[in-house]
């Protein structure tokens, strides 16, 4: 009697399980794929990228069908809905409507991944497994990045230096040379730096929350990632990592008063490390020199031009922006005349606020600020619950402190660059926010009965049915729309 009813359930769960593993593989692939940022717009990788993104909405539809989908809670569902309405509405009025809808669909897929992941994180064990997975992936990323950089950049250049010596020409290895900085594997040194700024505090949190061999492994991973970050010669990463380190130490002092003496020593050591890093890096020394000279040279003027371009573009489209993807196509139109030959061509504005203002206007800035406020509220509520938890342990909370610190540091870094179009960075942000949501739900469950908690986050039957029909129709419509685009892409190669 039980066997016939069990087998259909098992057969129905095979496809969602396969899609889930496909999502994991997709995330790992575009984290470690060499030059992934450029390959995302090259056939056939663009097709693989789109198929991977489509897994998010499809998995969410399966969760709705199996009645396992859950609300985000904390009024985040209203915010997610506002984004899902604003993105296509902005695209509908964009000058380049097809590009705008293309990127709007990417953003909607990211939101669907957030719902799928939050619904899966139903236990502390799953949260811990996800933390370990992300930590191991960052470790592999750093090892792969440093190895590729050494064999493909450092060693050939050192060989060139030796050859030049035979001609009496003296050269040295200098990270101020753009081509010598570590861009592996994403495709640009700033992307590598942004990913590590976001992820490094998690490794520190995992190291401090484990013991014996595990602690040695995570501290070694953090050291490896720090060396990789240094090899990018990113100036903004130095400032952002200082912000995330200060956040990590400050939160630990608040949550664990007994560790304050140790943390004071750690803060002094960290300060010395940042001073040594800054003094040893010619680019960081050059940054302060440029600031004292009123930013008259180098990349500061480059960013001034790109930010001014974004400002003028946003002023021309103040409410809904020029549409996602519009910066690349409209850049020359809004580039100021006083820029001269500076920053003549660029694919992004090197500032997330400027990019959002230019492409999404006031509605994008408003929703972005609300999103930052929501993430800050989740972090504060979790910290507040931990601070008044009499039976708290440092096993998992220190890893969550690492996540919060990484998010704060990356927000500081995002002021100087726009990187949300990278799967590894946007995917990590989605994972961190999903973990914060799940942690807040877990603390909420501990304060109320399980039935009350489920009732607060489950969707009613009629809502599930409407969302399933609408989502299925949307996925089919988008697939029909994308088919001729990908076919033309394929035939053009």
Image: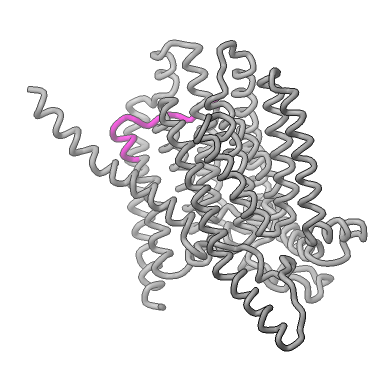
As displayed, is residue 346 above or below residue 168?
above
Instruction: Identify the residue shown where x is 65% and y is 62%.
Output: 348
Residue 83, percent from left and from top: 54, 43
56 and 182: which one is in front? 182
Instruction: Identify the residue shown where x is 69% and y is 22%.
Output: 259
Q: Is residue 394 left or right of residue 412?
A: left
Viewer can see residue 95:
no
Outermost residue on the right side: it is 293
177 and 359: which one is in front? 177
Instruction: Identify the residue shown where x is 67% and y is 39%.
Output: 408
Q: Quadrant of the N terminus?
A: top left
Residue 427, percent from left and from top: 50, 47
Outermost residue on the bottom side: it is 167
Can you tell which quarter of the image residue 470 is in?
Answer: top left
Can you tell which quarter of the image residue 460 is in?
Answer: top left
204 and 446: which one is in front? 204
As displayed, is residue 127 above or below residue 491?
above
- Queried whether the magenta region covers residue 73, the answer comes back as yes
Q: Quadrant of the C terminus?
A: bottom left
As displayed, is residue 366 above or below residue 258?
below
Residue 195, percent from left and from top: 59, 50
Q: What stretch is highlighted in magenta?
A: 61-74
Instruction: Identify the residue shown where x is 35% and y is 64%.
Output: 483
Q: Main secondary structure of the magenta part?
A: loop
Residue 456, percent from left and from top: 44, 20
Outermost residue on the front side: it is 166
384 and 307: which one is in front? 384
Q: Is residue 473 left or right of residue 85?
A: left
Looking at the picture, the colour scheme in use is one colour
How many numbered callouts?
A: 0
Viewer can see residue 83:
yes
């Amino acid at each position: 009697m039980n066997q016939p009813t069990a087998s259909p359930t098992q057969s129905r769960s095979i496809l969602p399980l396969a899609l889930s593993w496909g999502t994991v593989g997709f995330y790992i692939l575009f984290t470690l794929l060499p030059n992934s940022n450029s390959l995302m717009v090259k056939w056939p990788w663009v097709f693989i990228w789109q198929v991977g993104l489509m897994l998010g909405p499809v998995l969410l539809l399966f969760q709705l069908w199996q009645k396992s989908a859950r609300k985000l809670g904390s009024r985040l569902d209203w915010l997610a809905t506002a984004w899902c309405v604003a993105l296509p509405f902005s695209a509908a009025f964009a000058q380049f409507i097809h590009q705008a809808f293309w990127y709007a669909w990417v953003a909607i897929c990211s939101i669907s991944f957030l719902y799928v992941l939050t619904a899966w994180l139903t236990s502390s064990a799953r949260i811990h497994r996800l933390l370990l997975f992300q930590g191991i992936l960052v470790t592999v990323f750093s090892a792969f990045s440093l190895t590729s950089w050494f064999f493909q950049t450092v060693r050939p250049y050192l060989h060139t230096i030796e050859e030049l010596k035979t001609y009496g020409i003296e050269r040295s290895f200098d990270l101020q040379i753009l081509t010598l900085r570590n861009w592996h594997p994403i495709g640009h040194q700033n992307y590598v730096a942004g990913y590590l700024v976001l992820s490094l505090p998690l490794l520190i949190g995992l190291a401090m929350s484990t013991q014996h061999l595990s602690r040695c492994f995570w501290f070694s991973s953090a050291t490896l990632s720090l060396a990789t970050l240094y090899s990018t010669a990113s100036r903004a990463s130095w400032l952002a990592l200082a912000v995330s380190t200060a956040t990590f130490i400050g939160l630990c002092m608040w949550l664990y008063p007994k560790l304050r003496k140790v943390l004071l020593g750690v803060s002094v050591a960290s300060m010395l490390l940042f001073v040594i890093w800054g003094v040893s890096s010619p680019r960081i020394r050059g940054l302060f020199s440029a600031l004292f000279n009123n930013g008259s040279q180098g990349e500061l003027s480059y960013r001034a031009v790109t930010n001014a371009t974004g400002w003028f573009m946003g002023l021309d489209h103040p409410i809904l922006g020029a549409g996602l993807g519009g910066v690349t196509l409209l850049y020359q139109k809004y580039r100021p005349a006083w820029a001269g030959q500076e920053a003549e061509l660029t694919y992004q504005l090197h500032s997330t606020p400027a990019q959002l203002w230019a492409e999404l206007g006031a509605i994008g800035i408003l929703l972005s600020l609300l999103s930052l406020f929501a993430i800050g509220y989740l972090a504060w509520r979790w910290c507040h619950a931990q601070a008044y938890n009499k039976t708290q342990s440092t096993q998992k909370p220190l890893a969550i402190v690492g996540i919060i610190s990484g998010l704060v540091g990356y927000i500081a870094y995002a002021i100087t660059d726009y990187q949300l179009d990278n799967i590894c960075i946007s995917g990590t942000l989605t994972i961190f926010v999903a973990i914060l949501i799940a942690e807040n739900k877990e603390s909420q469950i501990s304060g109320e009965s399980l039935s009350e908690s489920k009732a607060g986050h489950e969707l009613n039957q009629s809502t599930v049915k409407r969302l399933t029909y609408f989502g299925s129709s949307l996925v089919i419509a988008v697939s029909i729309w994308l088919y001729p685009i990908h076919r033309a892409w394929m035939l053009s190669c």
